[in-house]
Image (spheres, rainbow, N blue to C red):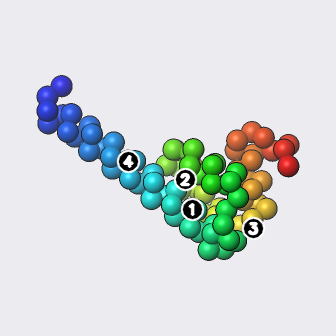
């Protein structure tokens, strides 16, 4: 792999990470503006999620649903819907 290819690969990685971080920040900001500071479980779920499609789907969830609906949806996605 030459220098140009390495640079392009690095650039794409940085752009992807920047977009991911922007979505994560937007989700936490939306939650906070609607409900106050997000609980640690919400913050952790957002921060450990790296799939752009999931983060984009959550934008609608965080902007249109209740706190309880958000919590239930995130717990269900993590597979621990039975915990309280």
Pick whichever of labels 4 and 2 is earlier in the sequence: 4
The relative height of residue 62 versus residue 52 in the rendered view (above or below) is below
Tag 3, which secondary structure? loop
How far separated are the C-alphas under marks 3 and 2?
17 Å
Q: Which residue is mark 4?
A: 16
Sequence-wise first label, 3 or 4: 4
Characterize the local packing of mark 4: few (<14), some (14-19) or many (20 or more) Cα atoms within 10 angstroms.
some
Q: State the separation of the CA atoms marked 3 and 4.
A: 29 Å
The residue carrying mark 1 is 27
To which residue does mark 2 refer?
A: 55
* Residue name at image x 18 percent, y 34 percent: 5
Q: Give the quarter of the image for residue 40.
A: bottom right
Relative to 28, 20 lies left or right: left
**Quarter placement of the N terminus:** top left
Q: Residues within 10 Å of mark 3 (few under 14, many from 20)?
A: some
Locate residue 16, reporting x and y percent: 38, 47
């Amino acid at each position: 792999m030459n220098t140009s290819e390495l640079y392009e690969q690095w650039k794409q990685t940085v752009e992807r990470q920047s977009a991911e971080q922007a979505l994560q920040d937007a989700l936490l900001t939306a939650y906070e503006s609607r409900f106050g500071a997000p609980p640690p479980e919400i913050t952790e779920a957002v921060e450990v999620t790296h799939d752009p499609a999931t983060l984009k789907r959550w934008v609608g969830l965080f902007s249109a649903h209740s706190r309880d609906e958000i919590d239930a949806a995130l717990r269900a996605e993590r597979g621990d819907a039975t915990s309280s």
